[in-house]
Amino acid sequence: MLYSDLMIDLETLGVDHGSVITQIGLCAFNAGDDPDSPVESTSFCVDIAMSLNLGFKVQGNTILWWCGRATRPVPRLSIARRMR
């Protein structure tokens, strides 16, 4: 099936430009179709250590926000533990 629209979802460890991205989600769909129409989606995890080595940054407040999420763990929790 061909889709005309693409939604991109980025999960990050900060809100500023240059923050570490932990996951990229993609969802292809047709905006004009019925909301129950089929979609195609996928996601990719991004290596946090590699991102840090490339100069991307982590913000402590974002780590605290992730720690407070009841339904989703902090991406690769070992990074959060090292920051404490």
Image (cartoon, grey):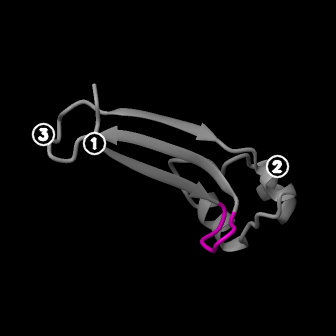
Q: Quadrant of the N terminus?
A: top left
24 lies above or below 80: above
Labelled disc at residue 50: 2
Q: Mark 2 or mark 3: which comes first in sequence?
A: 3
Q: Is residue 50 left or right of residue 29?
A: right
Q: Mark 3 or mark 1: which comes first in sequence?
A: 1
For marks 1 and 2, give the CA distance: 33 Å
Q: Residue 18 lies in magenta, yes or no?
A: yes
Q: Nearer the viewer, mark 3 or mark 1?
A: 1
Mark 3 residue type: Asp
Q: Residue at x 15, y 46 (%)?
A: 32
Mark 2 residue type: Met
Residue 44 falls in which quadrant of the image?
A: top right
Q: Is residue 16 left or right of residue 42?
A: right
Q: Is residue 78 left or right of residue 39?
A: right
Q: Residue at x 29, y 36 (%)?
A: 3
Residue beneath label 1, please? 4
Q: Which residues are magenta?
A: 13-19
47 lies above or below 69: above
Mark 1 residue type: Ser
Majority SS type along the magenta span: loop
Residue 34: x %, y % from top left? 12, 40
Q: Nearer the viewer, mark 1 or mark 2?
A: 1
For marks 3 and 1, give the CA distance: 14 Å
